[in-house]
């Protein structure tokens, strides 16, 4: 089989021409209509000199234009560089420069920044804005019929499809190069694994520029002829109301989303149409998993993945054994192993680094051969995550290697401490870091968000001391009104670390 993401849309448009591919606010569009718009965008880009080997940045939030442009860029033979529209001008400038993007499709709010960059960045030649009230190149130009006949270029499955910039813990982000095979195989397998059909209706409120949404909420449903319910920005009440009103069957989110949805005044009846919820992006606290499933009577299936693996490498099966705390089994056609620092597989139950091999593993990091060489060895991608595997082949993510805290020679895994803190009824969110300690090298510090303003640090400290070994419990606890998060709701542990002392 040869993978082609825009070809998947073309096939579904032929099979399900009059079925809705997405709904957004009060607008619903069929597969046939979307495919025609994608053809126009591809033709418009082609007329302006965008073709095979070029890169086009996509700086948009969740909207129909993202989906249209995404597939239009791919159909033109170019590759997509998704960028978070909330990034700072420095971050956007870096990615445009590093990716050598030839064009940008963005919202009009970024016109001032982008128009100035056209003259500064050698490769950036043109910009298009999705709102028509601007004096620059507009989205409508891409949708105009071309006098020239457009014949889509042939796509090889190893051609570059998407360049995803990872949020690295240090330095500038790296561009993970994902081919049509990387993205297409993961989407196809996800659809088969969870039985996607044209009758499914999936909520897309995860950021579309993020690989989790891209695979689970866009590429997979379009491959399978399903219906995407686009929500511009996550709002827990709106999500629950949409699930109930539109009879959604699938929902994908990150742990933070599930926590906020727990606070909505809703019942299991509102989730009666849901056949599965998917969680990824960060570890799902066991306490939250149990509470959500008890309240809404739905299963949350947890998986694991990275931008570099398009993204999924393991997932809990839909029909099979479910082990709370586990991220499931090897995803079909993907192999995961746990190895020691020498790359040798460790015994069952022991902790080591998780490495991955499969058709989903990236081509490498753009313009970074040394970083590519360091992360891909003998066909295996080294994730940088500590994990273990049980006797049944279920994987458990322990922590990032860089997040490991060493107290007097003893390993402390932040997630273990966080799980204990989450058991306290007043703790809504928790994150643990290592801080410098003159006696033990490092000690444990916790940041928590509480739902009780009268709770004391001493009470939480005592709660942890009663449940953790002496070297594991936090020596410091700080109560915050909220924890810093990225666009997907993942807690940004690195922003809480001290600027000196502990190098992580």
Image (tube, helix red, strand yellow):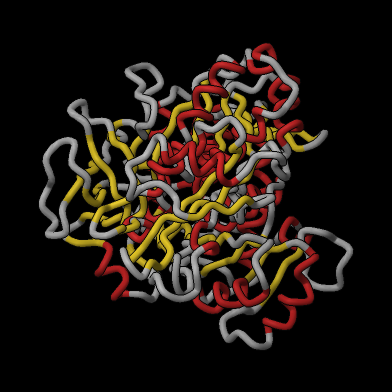
Q: Position of residue 244 (x, y in %)?
A: 72, 20
> Quarter of the image holding residue 314?
top left
Please report the residue visible at 27 percent of the width from the left and 60 percent of the height from the top.
408
382 left or right of 193 in image: left
Looking at the rendered structure, the number of numbered marks drawn on it comes to 0
| Residue in front for this viewpoint, 494 or 92 | 494
Q: Position of residue 412 (x, y in %)?
A: 32, 50
Q: Is residue 251 visible?
A: yes
Please report the residue visible at 35 percent of the width from the left and 61 percent of the height from the top.
402
Please report the residue visible at 66 percent of the width from the left and 70 percent of the height from the top.
88
| Residue in front for this viewpoint, 111 or 147 | 111
67 left or right of 330 in image: right
Where is 263 relative to 50, above or below? above
Q: Is residue 39 visible?
A: no
Q: Position of residue 48 (x, y in %)?
A: 65, 71
Q: Position of residue 160 (x, y in %)?
A: 42, 61
431 left or right of 428 in image: left
Please report the residue visible at 55 percent of the width from the left and 79 percent of the height from the top.
97
| Residue in front for this viewpoint, 41 or 266 | 266
Instruction: Tell me the quarter of the image containing the C terminus.
Output: bottom left
Where is 308 relative to 187, above or below? below
Instruction: Tell me the quarter of the image containing the N terminus.
Output: top left
112 left or right of 312 in image: right
| Residue in front for this viewpoint, 214 or 352 | 352
């Amino acid at each position: 089989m040869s993978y082609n993401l825009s070809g998947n849309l073309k096939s579904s448009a032929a099979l399900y021409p009059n079925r809705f591919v997405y709904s957004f606010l009060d607008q619903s569009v069929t597969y046939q209509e979307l495919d025609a718009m994608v053809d126009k965008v591809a033709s418009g880009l082609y007329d302006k000199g965008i073709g095979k080997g070029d890169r086009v940045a996509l700086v948009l939030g969740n909207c129909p234009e993202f989906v249209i442009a995404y597939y239009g860029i791919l159909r033109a033979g170019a590759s997509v560089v998704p960028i978070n529209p909330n990034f700072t001008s420095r971050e956007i400038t870096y990615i445009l420069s590093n990716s050598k993007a030839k064009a940008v499709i963005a919202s009009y709010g970024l016109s001032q920044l982008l128009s100035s960059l056209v003259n500064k960045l050698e490769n950036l030649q043109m910009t298009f804005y999705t709102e028509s009230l601007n004096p620059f190149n507009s989205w409508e130009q891409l949708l105009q019929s071309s006098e020239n006949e457009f014949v889509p270029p042939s796509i090889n499955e190893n051609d570059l499809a998407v360049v995803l910039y990872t949020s690295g813990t240090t330095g500038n982000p790296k561009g993970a190069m994902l081919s049509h095979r990387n993205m297409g195989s993961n989407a196809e397998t996800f659809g088969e694994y969870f039985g996607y059909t044209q009758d499914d209706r999936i909520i897309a409120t995860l950021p579309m520029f993020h690989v989790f949404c891209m695979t689970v909420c866009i590429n997979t449903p379009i491959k399978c002829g399903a219906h995407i319910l686009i929500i511009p920005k996550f709002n827990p009440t709106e999500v629950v109301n949409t699930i109930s009103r539109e009879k959604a069957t699938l929902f994908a989110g990150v742990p933070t989303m599930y926590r906020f949805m727990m606070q909505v005044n809703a019942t299991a009846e509102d989730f009666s149409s849901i056949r599965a919820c998917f969680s990824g992006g960060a570890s799902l606290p066991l306490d939250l998993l149990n509470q959500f499933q008890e309240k809404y009577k739905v299963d949350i299936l947890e998986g694991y993945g990275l931008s570099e693996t398009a993204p999924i490498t393991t997932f809990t099966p839909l029909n099979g054994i479910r082990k709370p705390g586990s991220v499931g089994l090897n995803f079909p056609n993907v192999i995961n192993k746990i190895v020691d620092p020498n790359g040798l597989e460790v015994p069952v139950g022991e902790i080591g680094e998780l490495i991955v091999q499969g058709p989903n593993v990236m081509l490498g990091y753009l313009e970074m051969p040394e970083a590519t060489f360091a992360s891909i060895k003998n066909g295996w991608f080294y994730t940088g995550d500590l994990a273990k595997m049980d006797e049944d082949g279920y994987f458990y993510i322990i922590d990032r290697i860089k997040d490991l805290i060493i107290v007097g020679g003893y390993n402390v895994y932040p997630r273990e401490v966080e799980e204990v803190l989450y058991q306290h009824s007043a703790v809504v969110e928790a994150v643990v870091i290592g801080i410098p300690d003159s006696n033990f090298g490092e000690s444990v510090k916790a940041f928590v968000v509480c739902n009780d303003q009268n709770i004391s640090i001493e009470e939480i400290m005592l709660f942890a001391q009663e449940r953790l070994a002496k070297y594991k419990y936090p020596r410091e606890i700080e109560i915050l009104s909220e924890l810093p998060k990225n666009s997907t709701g993942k807690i940004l542990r690195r922003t809480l670390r001290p600027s000196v002392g502990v190098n992580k």
